[in-house]
Image (spheres, helix red, strand yellow):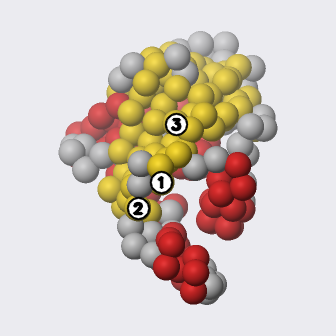
Amino acid sequence: MRQSAAVLILLMAGSAAATRTDYLNAQRKFKAIETQQTKPGTRVEISSQELNAYVEHELPQVAPPGIRKPHVVLLGGNKASGAALIDFVKMRSARGQTTNWVLRKLLQGEREVTVTARIRSGNGSATVDVERVEVAGLPIQGAALDFLIQNYLLPNYPQVKIGKPFGLHRRIDRVEVVPGMAYVVLKR
C-alpha cells in the first residue's frame, strides 16, 4: 500500500488549505482498505480535500528536502494534476550529490513543478502515463524531461514506474478519477 501511496503522492501533491479532519478521514479510509475492514467490491471515495490533506501530512515522510507546498487537482477522465514548489539543487544536495555550476545556476531555487498524468488501472494493476510536465510554467519534454526523471525522480523513488504497469495493493482492483474525487475500487 505504501508504494501505491507513494506513486499517488508523486503524481498528486497536496494542499496547504487541507484540514486535520480531511487528513484523518483519508487515513481512516486507506487503513480500512489495507486492513480489510471494507467489503470486497466496495468503491471507496476519496475527495480532493482528503487527498490533499493526506499528501500534505505524509509528503514530508516520503519526500526528500526541497519539495514543499504540494497541491492536487483531480481533473476527471482518470486524470490528475499535481504541483509543488521544488528546489532541484536542494534535493540533490540532500543525497550528498553536487550539481555542476551551470546546472546549479539553472536549477537553483524553488520552481513550481506541475505534472499532469492519466492513470489506467484494472485487475489489480495500474499504469501512470505522464501527459504534461511544466517547470515554472514552461513545458518540459524530450531530453530535458528524461534528465529530470533520471537525476531527480528515480534516485529518490527507484520503485516508481512511468508508462509501465505496476501492482496495486492486493485488495485494490482499480482507481478511478472524476472531477474532485478519486475512487478506490476493491476486488470482488
Label 3: few (<14), some or many (≥20) within 10 Å?
many
Residue at 52% x, 36% y: name it.
116
Q: Earlier in the sequence, mark 2 or mark 1?
A: 2
Say if residue 78 shows up in the picture: yes
Tell me if label 2 and label 1 are in contact, CB under 8 Å: yes
Residue at 59% x, 28% y: name it.
118
- Compared to residue 82, the image places residue 79 above or below, namely above
Q: Earlier in the sequence, mark 3 or mark 1?
A: 3
**Total numbered labels:** 3
Task: Say which element carries label 1.
Answer: strand
Say if residue 1 shows up in the picture: no
- Classify residue 87 by image quadrant: bottom left
Q: Which residue carries the number 1 mark? A: 135
Q: Earlier in the sequence, mark 2 or mark 3?
A: 2
Amino acid, disc 1: Val
Residue at 51% x, 61% y: name it.
62
Task: Say which element carries label 2.
Answer: strand
Residue at 46% x, 19% y: name it.
76
Q: Position of residue 24 (x, y in %)?
A: 31, 42
Q: Which residue carries the number 3 mark? A: 116
Distance Cα–Cα, label 2 vs label 1: 6 Å
Q: Position of residue 159 (x, y in %)?
A: 72, 54
Locate residue 110 relative to residue 17 in the image: left or right. Answer: right
Label 1: few (<14), some or many (≥20) within 10 Å?
some
Locate residue 160 relative to residue 112 in the image: left or right. Answer: right
Distance Cα–Cα, label 2 vs label 3: 16 Å
Distance Cα–Cα, label 3 vs label 1: 12 Å
- Compared to residue 52, the image places residue 148 above or below, namely below
Label 2: few (<14), some or many (≥20) within 10 Å?
some
**Foreground residue among 63 and 118:** 118
Amino acid, disc 2: Arg
